Amino acid sequence: MSKFVKFFNEIGIKDVPMVGGKNASLGEMYQNLTEDGIKVPNGFATTSDAYNYFVKETGLDKKIREILKGLNTKNMASLSKKGAAVRATIIKAEFPEDLKKEIVASYYKLSAEYGEKNSRLGTDVAVRSSATAEDLPDASFAGQQETFLNIRGEKELLIAVKKCVASLFTNRAISYRHDKGFDHFDIALSVGVQKMVRSDLGASGVMFTIDTESGFRDAVLINSIFGLGENIVQGKVNPDEFYVFKPTKTIISRSIGRKALKMIYNDDPKNPVKDVKVSEKDCKKASICDAEVLRLAEWGMAIEKHYARPMDIEWALDGKTNELFIIQARPETIHSTRDYNIIEEYKMEKKGRIIARGKSVGYKVGAGIANRIMSAKEIGKFKPGEVLVTEMTDPDWQPIMKIASAIVTDKGGRTCHAAIVSRELGIPCVVGTNDASKKIKTGQAITVSCTEGEEGIVYDGKVDFKINKINVKELKKPSVKIMMNIGTPKSAFGFSFFPNDGVGLAREEFIINDSIKIHPLALLNYNKIKDKAVKKKIDDLTFGYKDKKQFFIDKLAEGVAVIGAAFFPKDVIVRLSDFKTNEYRNLIGGQCYEPEESNPMIGWRGASRYYDEKYRPAFEMECAALKKVRDEMGLTNVKIMVPFCRTVEEGKRVIEIMKENGLKQGENGLEIYVMAEIPANIILAEEFAKIFDGFSIGSNDLTQLTLGIDRDSGGDFHVDGESNEKNAAVKSLIKHLIEVGKKTGRKVGICGQGPSDFPDFADFLLSEGIDSISLNPDTVIKTMMRLGGK
């Protein structure tokens, strides 16, 4: 039995000290998972004994120590020179004859297995390094960069093996071991030799059995490109991205990357692979089909189950045979080790010179360099981490709002665009300062504090603040259900770690703004559009879709599905689109389909749109998307809410259209709620209760319509004080609705801004016996701490 070479069927995860983590994992999967249908290309690994034998028999250990004498890792020129000398010495060294024979014999044995019996050239293999000293902190990084693809023939193989050995002495690895006081020969290196998969003719990628951004464990993330996988590892190509939801085993999200390059085989032995451009046609299509996505996810879940932890996996699709293979698997080490029971709370340590005051949005603190931008045309000047200072925002500003550390506006109230978006993104925001843009200059360091009550404060300079960590396991659960308002799907996985009873409000508008950007009727009537500029914008956003209507259905369904999956199996109440005409006009192609209204807030919106023949075809597209979420993706926890329903008759008409489009109330657990945001909804609550399954109070609009306030005016319309949800008239209506809900057996919740902004208003709702309070994520912890045990 050889001590220098082990085939994959001879090694397992217990053999990390002998063949390193990568190779031990390949052997583990080859031996234990191939019976389950998971395909792993065969191969072999040189052992730590082989490495030690090589460096001692050739005297490399002494030569390397001699070269590294007097090493000063702070002198980069010296480090670089010595490192290059070490690597060159290793590559010049000859393998001992017995070791060389064993490597070559193993290579030809592998070649014969793959049909290369008569060729002395041998088969094509991938050669990778695998460090063996797992007990040294961070030792496993050494050599991981070195991978050699499409290696063929014994001469090229032996050179590649030596290059892998040399990678143990990269400048960074030498510096790390020297500075930590480790002996350079406390670590050994194994080299893996694995049969290549012809993904140069197919596709390849990486797969994580956990969401890499949030640590959400019920999703499998798959990235895919054309050609060999090295380009995706190196980040040279923008890949396709797919999310598969584990409980339902369905694809809940997909996005097509540009994939402008692909790595393929090259005939030159010195350069066995090369990059070529991908055709424009192929750039616009998915590199793998849905069936392949689902097969990979199935394999990923099986691998995760075997290892009993989230995994980081590399895979390849053979373009000759159309077979999928797993070519690497290692534990995911970033999110799987984090404690998600700890929530952060921000507090100011000091106070500085106050530049501006306004209304606070959220409960965080953000600091950074201010960037004063007064027009959406200038947003290209904004850099990640800066503080956005402006007059006001609209949907055109969202690309930079997502990367801001904080936002400050002159205008707007707590329900303006900047407030809503920053709240959903978890970014601190101060609105309605009146003159912040006049006082703050671009390049000035500022701190934006939303931790000091209802007033938001902008300080000059970077002022110290601290973050308190709260263990959610220690929070007392209140008697009322605490749900969350979720806007962007991208935030849903992260917010799912907060203590919650589901989602009380998921807004379709955020999904349409972020993922679709086009008016649904413009997509429906694509062939009739004559404006070339509009058509080009639509083409750019919908590439890969011949049927533009299907683009809307798919993207809306995927956005809703991600939110539904994040909180599954808890209820997720999705509000049908509630854009106002001015907001619809801002969508691409919207001006062709939207009237100009003097007061859109009380105009053509909500239920009145859905049955209007001018808009009904677009509403039916919404219905198709929601039906897809529930029926095809299996997310039956998604409920539907009808906004701005003025009359009972309107409600009946909308419910009937939904039924005609496959969304039958009561079927497969489908519940339909109504927003209680118009006084008529509450005055006639008993009648509305006969057709809807529950009510969700929209306290923003209810306050507006009860008190005659135009909330679009925000901070410019000075009717503060009692012009909020705490007004006696508003509270009286809410009290009555809760009573009717109990009488009729209908659920009554609230998803408006009130309980997030005013803790005493949350106390009132609790005392009246409301069924659920849906809060913005940034106020969930604070409200739970206040209401806990009550």
Image (spheres, helix red, strand yellow):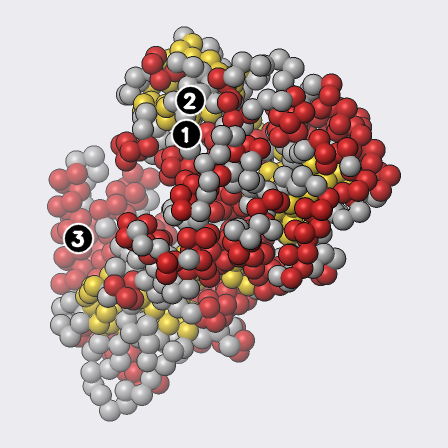
Q: Secondary structure at mark 3?
A: helix
Callout 2–callout 1 Cβ contact below 8 Å: yes
- 468 up-or-down from 87: above or below: above
Residue at left offset 53%, top offset 67%? 298
Which mark is on residue 393?
1
- 167 up-or-down from 353: above or below: below
Mark pair 2, 3: CA separation: 58 Å
Q: Earlier in the sequence, mark 3 or mark 1?
A: 3
Tell me the kind of residue under disc 3: Val
Q: Secondary structure at mark 2?
A: strand
Residue at left offset 35%, top offset 85%? 113
Tell me the kind of residue under disc 2: Thr
- 743 up-or-down from 626: above or below: above
Residue at left offset 56%, top offset 40%? 605
Residue 728 position within the rendered picture, expressed as x and y whole percent measured from the top left: 73, 18
Which mark is on residue 459?
none
Q: Secondary structure at mark 1?
A: loop
Q: Is residue 540 visible?
A: no
Mark pair 3, 1: CA separation: 58 Å
Mark pair 2, 1: CA separation: 8 Å
* Residue, disc 2: 409
